[in-house]
Image (spheres, rainbow, N blue to C red):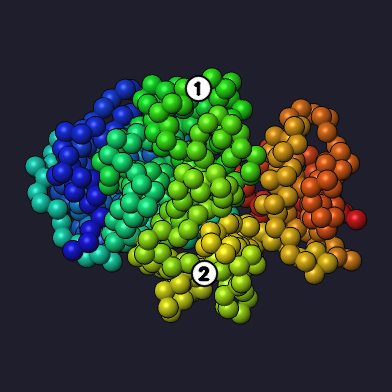
């Protein structure tokens, strides 16, 4: 029977192995200790909190050991965990709470203001603070645990029972709850560990938010599955990450392009001891080649991965040698993963041609919570998940991501992929960040507009950037307008919210002629 209790299975095999290091406090936990904490959390849910298998419990917290307790408790109890984004407003959280049908919320005292705002909008059976209560009536988590009987055996679950609901970032429209079943959690952990060739002596820092699929699926569950060690940061700080990589002798590190850029720009980058690192890997968005080359110049193998919340975040793999030979590629599909690149009619594209990436396998989600229309639109009758990402496949079966299909625009009848332009813009020494959108144009249908964050005010102008791009890109790809801004709107996981840029452009009334 497939279930999602990966921690329990690993603790049974290697109970005394180091499982977790929490950076802010230096606390260290073996697999036996971490498993016991999760079992107690599960017993608390089913005991004092009065929840039953299938009920939903929310978790609003920054990265901390209790987050792992709750996540792994879902694998032991049958209760469905709903992690909530810590950057969301009470109004945004209201939608998630109502849509998921939460019965209880475990919350971080550091988010007291958000919790108070949420209380004014929704009613829940239980509000459980991990530390400081926002209401005198709230029973702290420590007291709930003190009233919890000794954990019993794991609650039986079916492979397709929901393990957690992961709400998408909502870059367009309301966030949708992705139904992650127990089967999907197990497949993600085991298949990633196998195909990425993780080892029991691997040590991996996690500094991305745990409420996001990337934080949970890469590398938390794969490292736990193989018996390695997680080094958990409360948040991202470039200097702290470099110190931790050295001090804890980290071997495999996952980040997103934004984070890799910040780490590269930190003063610690040039002198950091990377002798224990086996490889770095980037995911979450297309990776500019210059970042790969910068890390390779430090003698580190740098891979690019690919995944979505709906397909388990890890779907492709590549060897160290291929990471160099095929830089810019996301690799070949992992074992038991089917992948296609199709045109608008659903026919397979020939090698080298861009089309939509479709994926199928045991790591694909069941669909969207309370949203059969969205499920039917993304997951077809044959089990293929339509990712909405544009990709190409080469003759050797290696895939590369061209960008989001909805980001693509058509200029003069030719497809233009913003990710390609953004990658080139970021090579300019005076550009700190950049994003490109398509806007309507009377003659060409659509043209590009680049939003640019310069390294210093007046350091560069649009004419200079256009000339820079003209040496690297075809003329039709060069943006017709450059808008200079102080920063780009991003999700907690680093993705640019291009819908916000579209709104900003429309409000300002720019004309790309």
Please say if the residues under marks 2 and 1 sit with CB atoms less than 8 Å apart. Answer: no
Instruction: Find numbered disc 2 in the image and state the secondary structure of the residue it sits on.
Output: strand
Decide which of 95, 319 is in the foreground and name it: 319
Quadrant of the image for the N terminus?
Answer: bottom left
Q: Which residue is mark 2?
A: 340
The answer, for residue 418, to whether it is visible in the render is yes
Instruction: Determine the residue positioned at 28% across, 59% down.
Output: 182
Residue 2 % position (x, y): 22, 61
Q: Quadrant of the C terminus?
A: bottom right
Residue 106: x and y in percent read 32, 43
**What percent of the width, then of the height, locates residue 8?**
19, 47
Residue visible at 37% across and 57% down? 165
The answer to which quarter of the image holds residue 206 is top left
Disc assigned to residue 272: 1
Point out which mark residue 299 bears.
Answer: none
Left or right of 307 on screen, residue 204: left
Q: Nearer the viewer, residue 35 or 55?
A: 35
Residue at 30% across / 53% down in the picture? 190
The answer to whether any part of residue 255 appears in the image is no
Q: How many marks?
A: 2
Q: Is residue 141 above or below residue 376?
A: above
Helix, strand or loop at mark 1? loop
Q: Quadrant of residue 201?
A: top left
CA distance separating discs 2 and 1: 40 Å
Q: Which residue: 68% across, 45% down?
A: 423
Q: Residue 31's spot in the image, x, y percent?
A: 20, 37
**Sequence-wise first label, 2 or 1:** 1
422, 216: nearer the viewer: 422
Nearest the viewer among 48 and 408 is: 408
Question: Where is 394 relative to 139, above or below?
Answer: below
Q: Is residue 230 above or below residue 401?
A: above
Residue 332 left/right relative to 391: left
């Amino acid at each position: 029977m497939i279930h999602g209790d990966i921690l329990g299975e690993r603790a049974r095999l290697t109970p005394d192995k180091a499982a977790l290091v929490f950076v802010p406090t230096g606390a260290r936990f073996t697999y036996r200790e971490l498993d016991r904490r999760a079992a107690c959390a599960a017993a608390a849910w089913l005991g004092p909190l009065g929840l039953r298998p299938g009920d939903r419990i929310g978790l609003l917290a920054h990265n901390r050991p209790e987050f792992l307790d709750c996540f792994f408790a879902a694998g032991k109890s049958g209760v469905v965990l709903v992690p909530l984004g810590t950057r969301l407003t009470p109004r945004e959280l209201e939608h998630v709470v109502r849509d998921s049908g939460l019965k209880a919320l475990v919350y971080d005292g550091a988010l007291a203001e958000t919790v108070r705002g949420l209380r004014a909008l929704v009613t829940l059976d239980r509000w459980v603070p991990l530390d400081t209560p926002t209401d005198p009536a709230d029973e702290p988590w420590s007291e709930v645990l003190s009233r919890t009987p000794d954990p019993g055996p794991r609650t039986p679950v079916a492979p397709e029972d929901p393990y957690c609901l992961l709400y998408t970032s909502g870059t367009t429209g309301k966030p949708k709850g992705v139904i992650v079943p127990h089967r999907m959690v197990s497949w993600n952990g085991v298949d990633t560990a196998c195909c990425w060739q993780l080892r029991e002596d691997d040590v991996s820092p996690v500094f991305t938010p745990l409420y996001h699929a990337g934080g949970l699926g890469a590398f938390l569950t794969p490292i736990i599955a193989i018996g390695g060690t997680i080094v958990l940061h409360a948040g991202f700080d470039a200097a702290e990450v470099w110190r931790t990589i050295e001090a804890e002798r980290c071997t495999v590190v996952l980040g997103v392009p934004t984070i890799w850029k910040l780490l590269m720009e930190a003063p610690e980058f040039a002198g950091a001891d990377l002798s224990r690192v086996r490889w770095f890997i980037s995911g979450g968005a297309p990776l500019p080649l210059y970042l790969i080359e910068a890390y390779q110049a430090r003698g580190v193998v740098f891979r690019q991965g690919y995944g979505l919340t709906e397909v388990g975040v890890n779907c492709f793999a590549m060897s160290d040698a291929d990471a160099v030979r095929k830089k810019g590629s996301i690799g070949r599909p992992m074992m038991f993963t089917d992948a296609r690149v199709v045109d608008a009619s659903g026919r397979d594209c020939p090698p080298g041609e861009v089309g939509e990436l479709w994926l199928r396998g045991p790591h694909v989600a069941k669909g969207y919570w309370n949203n059969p229309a969205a499920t039917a639109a993304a997951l077809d009758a044959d089990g293929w998940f339509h990712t909405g990402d544009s990709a190409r496949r080469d003759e050797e079966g290696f895939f590369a991501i061209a960008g989001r299909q909805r980001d693509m625009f058509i200029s003069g009848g030719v497809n233009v992929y913003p990710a390609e332009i953004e990658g080139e813009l970021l090579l300019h020494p005076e550009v700190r960040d950049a994003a490109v959108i398509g806007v309507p144009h009377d003659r060409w249908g659509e043209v590009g507009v680049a939003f640019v964050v310069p390294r210093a005010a007046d350091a560069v102008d649009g004419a200079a950037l256009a000339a820079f791009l003209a040496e690297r890109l075809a003329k039709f790809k060069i943006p017709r307008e450059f808008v200079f801004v102080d920063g780009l709107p991003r999700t907690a996981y680093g993705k640019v919210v291009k819908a916000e840029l579209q709104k900003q452009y429309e409000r300002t009334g720019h004309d790309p002629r």
